[in-house]
Amino acid sequence: MAEPLYIFLFAGIVSMSAALSAGALNKQPQEKRPAFMQKPNGQITVIMAGNFGALTLLGAMAFGFLKLHWWIPLSCMFITFPIVHLLIFQRVLGDLKALILMLPLTLLAAVSLYYYW
């Protein structure tokens, strides 16, 4: 069986990164958005990706509170996950590439949360 801490950390980091990247893309001015977001379907896709990341983050938090000591998921939610996203993923990849990379990983995280629950 996989270690619950590793599942929680993986699921939390990728899902928060997907949600924060989608939020950052939606907050950009209309003229600075990527070309595919100029169309209504592109913007809806980014919103849905952010919602999927947020829901997976909620699942990761529930998994963490169920399987780990309470302070681990709480501190990761407010300190570790945002710092990892802002200092590593957003600076290295940028918002669009981070969202494109994290979306399939978020799907994998949701499946692993379901499997190991």
Image: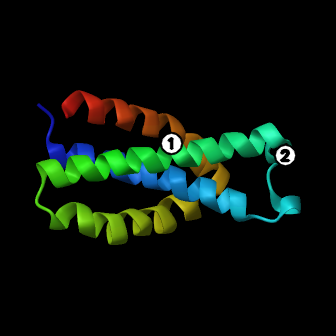
Residue at left offset 69%, top offset 57%: 25
Residue at left offset 28%, top offset 31%: 114
Q: Are the residues at dot 1 and dot 2 in contact (C-beta closer than 8 Å)? A: no
Q: What mark, if any, has residue 5 been given in the picture?
A: none
Q: Is residue 9 visible?
A: no
Classed neighbour count for the residue bearing mark 2: other residues with Cα under 10 Å, few (<14), some (14–19), many (≥20): few
Q: Which residue is mark 1?
A: 52
Residue 21 percent location from the top left of the image: 58, 56
Q: Is residue 32 above or below residue 63?
A: below
In front: 98, or 46? 46
> Which image quarter holds the C terminus?
top left
Classed neighbour count for the residue bearing mark 1: other residues with Cα under 10 Å, few (<14), some (14–19), many (≥20): some
Element type at mark 2: helix
Q: Is residue 39 above or below residue 108?
A: below
Residue at left offset 61%, top offset 42%: 48
Q: Give the mark nearest the N terminus, 1 or 2.
A: 2
> Which image quarter holds the N terminus?
top left
Residue at left offset 56%, top offset 49%: 50
Q: Which residue is mark 2?
A: 35
99 relative position to 35: left or right: left
Q: Is residue 38 above or below residue 80?
A: above
**Three-letter residue code for mark 2:** Ala
Distance Cα–Cα, label 1 vs label 2: 22 Å
Residue 100 percent location from the top left of the image: 60, 42
**Three-letter residue code for mark 1:** Phe
Residue at the far right in the pictured view: 31
Residue 103 percent location from the top left of the image: 53, 39
